[in-house]
Every structure is written in structure tokens, then in C-alpha cells.
Amino acid sequence: MGQTERLYKIEQMLRNRKVVPIQDFLKALGVSPATFKRDIEYLRNRLNAPIPWDRERRGYRLYDPDPNAPRHELPGLWFNSAETHALLIFHHLLDNLQPGLLAPHIKPLQDRIQKLLEKDDHSFEEVMRRIRVLPLAARHTDVAHFQTIAHALLGRRRLRIVHYNRQRNEETGREVSPQRLAHYRDNWYLDAWDHGKKALRSFAVDSIRKAVPTDKKARTISDKTLDTELGSGYGIFAGRKTQWAKLRFSPERARWVAQEQWHPKQNGRFDEDGYYLLEIPYSDDRELLMDILKYGPDVEVLRPAALRDKVRKQLEIARAQYDIDAKPHPPRPRHEHLST
């Protein structure tokens, strides 16, 4: 049992039993008296843990410190990779949050995260210098719009929005019932019921040019329906009607892709030649198409034929841009990107 696990075990035993004899600690932890003493001193001196020795009851006890005394926290960085990543992401989001309603509350949250991430002699500054979170392709979100959307979402009120469609380069007015906000690939998206379209839609928050709350009560869609409609397909462009794509990656690229999760319901396996076969569900191919194209010659779409044909056409257009003998260039097809 490592020191981290022992520290948690000591505090757990103290909280459960109030007073714990030293022999019980030694038995439960499997350590020598000297090691246990060092752990207690670490909790007391480094983490401000209030653990006095109770002479009458012959054991250590945990009591609530003076309200003005520093709170003790168990150190971090023994978190698993997912927990550490979540803390770093949360700190990054707070650090980059523009001034708004949360401004007075941000500093205490950041301070608490910093304490959690500190370990032994490693300061928070050292942790952040050594472990970095690098956001990619994050787009600017208007603070006022985000606050209005969040208020309507939590207050269960409808919104009138002006949405900018990048594909058509035009703005349209919508009345929507906000259902949930999602932070996906470093950008925010609003899942909402579109009363004009009478359907669920996802809107990039940075594409919302105007948001006005109304007095109308929002229509509430069940989580099950939201997950079925928006969570069954691939990425942010999900939907109820899904089909499956089968991709084959080269043996070289398979070393990376085999460790990636493209979709929770994906199926992947190696064939006898070392190629990696990946099957994923999708309902709208826009995002999937972009992810396939970035692998260039290292991936082949085996099926469906329609997706394979789209990838082929895109690669032909890309090639034509570098072919000096190809005049004029083929016209570019119109695409609706993730930011719509």
C-alpha cells in the first residue's frame, strides 16, 4: 500500500470510528510504527489535518478545526489520468473564462483545484508547467449570450435566437426550448427543441448572434430521447437514423487508432495483415468526413458506398488544387461544418 492510499485510509478510519488505537492502524495499513508516525506528521504538518492523540481513550481522533483555521486537503496527482485531466481542464476553463456573473466565485474554485493538484514538494506552478492542456480550434463565445442561454436553460424558459449559418452565410430567427449545453472539442453547443422545425437541433453557441429570453415555459425533452436523437450517431451531428461506417487503417496508423475511442459503441479489430478495421455508427457524415480525411492515405472507407464516394470526391478536389495541368479546378462543393 503506497503513501497516498495510506493517507486516505487513515482519514477514512478516523471519520468512521472517531477514535482509533494505533495498533488498529498498524494492522489495517500493514506498516511499521515509524512509517505510521511519519504519515500522521505529514497529515498534521503538511495538510493541516486536525488529528490529536486522545490520552483518555488511547487513540487518535479527528475533530473539526477552528473555523478560521486552514482547511486540510489530501494532495492530488495520485488521481488517475481521467481525474487529473478533468481537474486540469476545469482549471483551464476557469482561467480562460471571460468576466461575467461567476467572476466573484472563480478565484476560490481555482484555489481549491490548485490545492488538489499539489503533491509533496511539487507546487501548483510546477504541476501546470509540467502538465499542459492545449485547446485546439476553440472559437470565441459571447459572454452575454452564454449567460442568457444558461439562465434560460436552468430556468426552463424558451429563447428567441438569431442563428448564423456558416454554410449559407445567412442569419435566421428561431424560437427554441434549451435542453442542455455541451462542451465538445473545446467549443460549446446548445441542444434545443426548435419550435419552428419541430425537431431537436444542436447549435454552436458561437454561431448564436442574439439570444432573448421569453416568458414562455420551455418544452422539456426526456434525457432518453435526447440521448437517442443526439447521442446515437457520430460526434456532434448525431440523430436517430443511424448507419454504420467501416474504415480500414494502415498497419502503421493502426498503432494509434486502435487506442482511440471515436464512438462509445464502436467495434474495432485487427485483420490478419495488421490492418485495423473500425466500425462506427453515424447519422450525419459531416464530422465523420472531416475526421476520415485528416488521415489521408492511411485510411480507406470500405462501406457504405455513399460515404466512400464522398471521401473519394473530396480527395480528387484536393489533388486538383496541386495539379498545375488541371484547369479550371473543379468547383468546390458546399459543406456545412461543425460550427453551424
Image (tube, grey):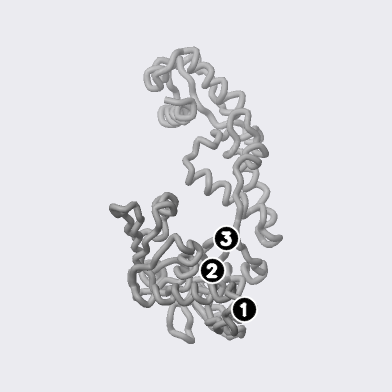
Q: Residues within 10 Å of mark 2 (few under 14, many from 20)?
A: many
SS for callout 1: strand
Residue 247 place in picture, x, y as percent: 37, 64
Question: Mark 2 near mark 1, Cβ–Cβ under 8 Å?
Answer: no
Quadrant location of the C terminus? bottom right
Q: CA distance from mark 3 to mark 1?
A: 25 Å
- Which residue is under mark 2? 189
Q: Name the residue type under label 2.
A: Tyr
Q: Name the residue type under label 3.
A: Asp
- Which residue is under mark 1? 212
Report whether residue 268 is seen. Answer: yes
Residue for point 43% across, 52% down: 252
Q: Name the residue type under label 1.
A: Val
Residue 142 place in picture, x, y as percent: 66, 69
SS for callout 3: loop
Q: CA distance from mark 2 to mark 1?
A: 17 Å
- Which residue is under mark 3? 186
On the picture, is 159 further left or further right than 56? right
For marks 3 and 1, the one nearer the N-term is 3
Residue for point 39% across, 60% down: 263
On the picture, is 278 further left or further right than 46? left
Nearest-to-viewer mark from 2 and 1:
2
For marks 2 and 1, the one nearer the N-term is 2
Question: Where on the picture, by quarter, is residue 114?
Answer: top right
